[in-house]
C-alpha cells in the first residue's frame, strides 16, 4: 500500500449512481478504503448516518453499512462502511462507491462521505 492515496473524493448521499474512482481492479487485487463524515437520510433532523450505519437513539450506530462498493456492471454491492484494510477485490472492474438507500430515497438526502482509496 502506498502512503499517498490513489483516489480521494466525496460520495454524495443524493446520487443513486454514486461515484467512479476510475480505479481498475482485477479480482483478488488488494485495496484499502477509509471513509469518514455523516449524511442525512431525508428531511428529519434525526435521520443521520455515518459510513458504518444509521445513527439511532442514543447515538449508537446500527450495523447496516451505508457506504458500499460495486465493480463494473454486475450491480452487486459490497459493504465498505468506515473502511476496509487490504480487502481483496471480489470482482474485476472499475471501483464505484455509493450510499445505500431505496431506489426512490435519494432525492431528500444531503451531505457526503469523504473517502480515500489506497492500492
Image (cartoon, helix red, strand yellow):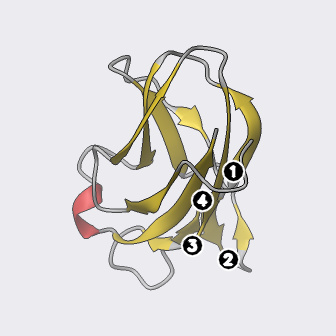
Q: Earlier in the sequence, mark 2 or mark 3?
A: 3
Residue 57 percent coordinates (x, y): 67, 77
Q: Which numbered mark, 2 or 3, is in the foreground of this view?
A: 3
Marks 2,4: beta carbons within 8 A: no
Residue 62 is left or right of residue 51, and the answer is right
Report the residue marked by disc 3: 37
For the residues bearing labels 4 and 1, Cβ distance under 8 angstroms: yes
Q: Position of residue 44 (x, y in %)?
A: 39, 80
Determine the residue positioned at 70% across, 64% down.
61
Residue beneath label 1, please? 83
- Above-or-below relation of 113 to 80: below
**Label located before the other in sequence (4 or 1):** 4
Mark 1 surroundings: few (<14), some (14-19) or many (≥20) residues within 10 A: many
Q: CA distance from mark 1 to mark 3?
A: 12 Å
Q: Quadrant of residue 15?
A: bottom left
Q: Is residue 90 above or below residue 59?
A: above
Q: Of tags 4 and 1, which is closer to the observer? A: 1
Check the picture and name the quadrant holding the N terminus. Answer: top right
Q: Identify the mark nearer the N-term, 1 or 3.
A: 3
What kind of element bears circle 1? strand
Alpha-carbon neighbours of circle 3 within 10 Å: few (<14), some, or many (≥20)?
Answer: some
Relative to the observer, which residue lies in front, 39 or 115? 115
Determine which of the numbered discs, if any, sits on residue 30 in the image. Answer: none
Q: Of the numbered discs in the image, which one, if any, rests on residue 57?
A: 2
Element at badge 2? loop
Q: Earlier in the sequence, mark 2 or mark 1?
A: 2
Distance Cα–Cα, label 4 vs label 1: 8 Å
Q: Which residue is mark 4?
A: 51
Going by the picture, which residue comes out furthest to the bottom?
A: 45
Is residue 10 at least partly visible in the picture?
A: yes
Amino acid at each position: 500500500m502506498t502512503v499517498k492515496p490513489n483516489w480521494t473524493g466525496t460520495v454524495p448521499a443524493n446520487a443513486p449512481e454514486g461515484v467512479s474512482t476510475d480505479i481498475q481492479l482485477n479480482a483478488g487485487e488488494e485495496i484499502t478504503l477509509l471513509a469518514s463524515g455523516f449524511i442525512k437520510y431525508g428531511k428529519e433532523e434525526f435521520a443521520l448516518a455515518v459510513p458504518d450505519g444509521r445513527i439511532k437513539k442514543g447515538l449508537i450506530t446500527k450495523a447496516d453499512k451505508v457506504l458500499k462498493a460495486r465493480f463494473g456492471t454486475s450491480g452487486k454491492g459490497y459493504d465498505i462502511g468506515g473502511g476496509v484494510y487490504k480487502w481483496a477485490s471480489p470482482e474485476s472492474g472499475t471501483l464505484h462507491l455509493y450510499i445505500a438507500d431505496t431506489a426512490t430515497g435519494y432525492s431528500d438526502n444531503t451531505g457526503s462521505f469523504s473517502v480515500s482509496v489506497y492500492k
